[in-house]
Amino acid sequence: MKKIGEYSLPMLRVLLIAIVMNCLLEILNGRSISELFAFASEKTIYFWLNALIIMLTLSIAGIFRIRYMLEFLVVFAWVTIGITNYIMLNFFRTAPMTAMDLKVVKNAILLLPNYFSGLQITWIIIGLLGLGFLLFKILKYLSIHHIPVSQRKRSGITVGLVSAFLGLLTIVPLYSEEGSEPVESVDLVENYENYGFTYSFADSLIGQGIEEPEGYSKEMVEQAWKHTKQEKQVTIKPNIIMIQLESVFNVERLLKKAGHEQALETYKELMDNYSSGALTVPVLGDGTANTEFEVLTGMSLDFFGLGEYPYNGILKEKAAESLAYNLKNYGYATYAMHNNIGEFYSRDVVYEQLGFDEFLSLEGMEDVEFNTLGWAKDKIYLDQIIERMGATSARDFIFAVSVQPHGKYPEEDPYGYYTSQLEEVDAFIEELIDVLDHHTEPTMLVLYGDHLPPLGLTEEDLRDGNLYATEYVIWSNYSMDHNDQDLITYELAAKVLDCAKLTYKNGPIAATHQQDLTEEERKERLHLFQYDMLYGDGYIFDEIATYSNENYHWKNK
């Protein structure tokens, strides 16, 4: 009995710490005490799965001589992650923290002046230095306390047992609340609510990339490409200008915010008279780069890991099919611009991989005006677009990412501030339309919102109850068929190519969207091409030219 006690008591101690940590992380992620008890009672398996993940990280520390120091570091790491998640949810965005956020720490630092004053940043630095000094003293004290070999062996047994339990639990299918159908959602908020913070965070850490399709082979890719038919059409090859509008959506969808309905008069008029529709986006309140990724590549994020940002991962290493590369096949010059820091979301690197000839970021723009929160106003694009169109003899593809209505909004009147920014964006759109309408070359303008604004909206606040839908519109200064259609973001580029009648020199992703396929067939083909192109053996490049961009230039001065 004594030996059992010597083994079980340390294990119970670690388990108790893990349970307490699990509860703390759930509360920091927004669960109330009653919601925490409901989660523990209704989804008991997942509650224990979360606790055992934490227990495993603590148990591994016990294998080493400096167990107490390493256990403290593990607890400190989890608490830091939890507090960071709490700060992000309450001050910056609506989606929980994922492991991928650790890759954008540099970007977050660059944006600090947009959220804090110089004095506040100084106090933050002083606070972090003080915390670092205190951490150093604690670790120095704990490092001299060693544990005997016998205890380390028992910790090794604990690691084995916990790993076994985790293995058993993780083979249990992830079921919906009804318990009948597996949940297949990439919605961060929903996943964290259903499966707990720790499990979801760990999933975002180890579940990255695209899973290999069943039966993946060179022959499979060849056959898929062979059956992706493309037909040539008569086209006038218009200039194509695409603007991703930060946090823009039709405010008439709001139920209880009367008085702001006139904020986008020009934009709504365009939607009434030109091809337009609802646009299902992959993010809510933030995550601009993932909407941008799906639009430019035509790829679906459903095949990637939870919370993954391809811009901060695979696209920094590999080139991929994109609207820019497809338009280059027709002789277009390609140009990207963003009135924010060029390194944010690694755009300075990713735009090269996506086939843009040149990228103009905020650092290279002159005479920029800023709003009261420090975001550049979108009207800077007017002169930039006109200048670019006049600089080349070829047809132009210009892709711009706006930033003006970016949150977080002033607490005293968030809706008033937000709609005042929409009015300025709408005025910019009106002026741009007027200029393009008199342009001598045929020109198409594509406008769309990247996600709903971070206003704490719920489904009950919207007439359609859809938190993952904005709108798009396709305008032209020449006669073009009017075809309203609701789309998903990864379908928009193919829609643009269809409207321009550019349908015979496109890569496998765009060509797949342009086929008459069932939804199941399309998903299978997208999965195959996306995996092969980004993570597989690249068999598709035996059929088409590889994507390379030798003349890219980042204009940041």
Image (tube, grey):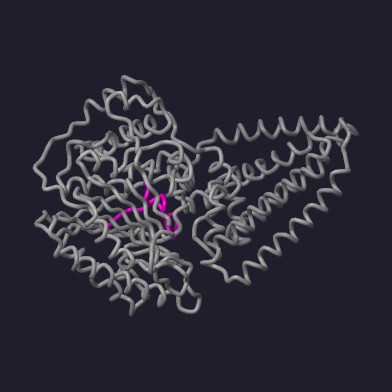
Q: Is residue 281 magenta?
A: yes
Q: Pick the quarter of the image with the C terminus.
A: bottom left
Query: 120 left or right of 238?
Result: right
- Give x and y (percent) for residue 348: 43, 49
Q: Is residue 515 magenta?
A: no
67 versus 481 height, above or below: above
Most extreme residue toward the right, as rendered? 2
| Residue 182 appearing in the image | no
Q: Pick the quarter of the image with the N terminus.
A: top right
User: Quick one: 333 or 225, which is closer to the camera?
Assistant: 333
- Give x and y (percent) for residue 261: 30, 75
Hey, which quadrant is residue 284 in on the image?
bottom left
User: Quick one: 240 or 527, which is closer to the camera?
Assistant: 240
Hey, which quadrant is residue 259 in on the image?
bottom left
User: Quick one: 470 or 48, which is closer to the camera?
Assistant: 470
Give the extent of the magenta segment.
Answer: 278-293
- Give x and y (percent) for residue 72: 77, 48
493 versus 416 height, above or below: above
Residue at 37 percent across and 27 percent down: it is 538
321 versus 346 height, above or below: above
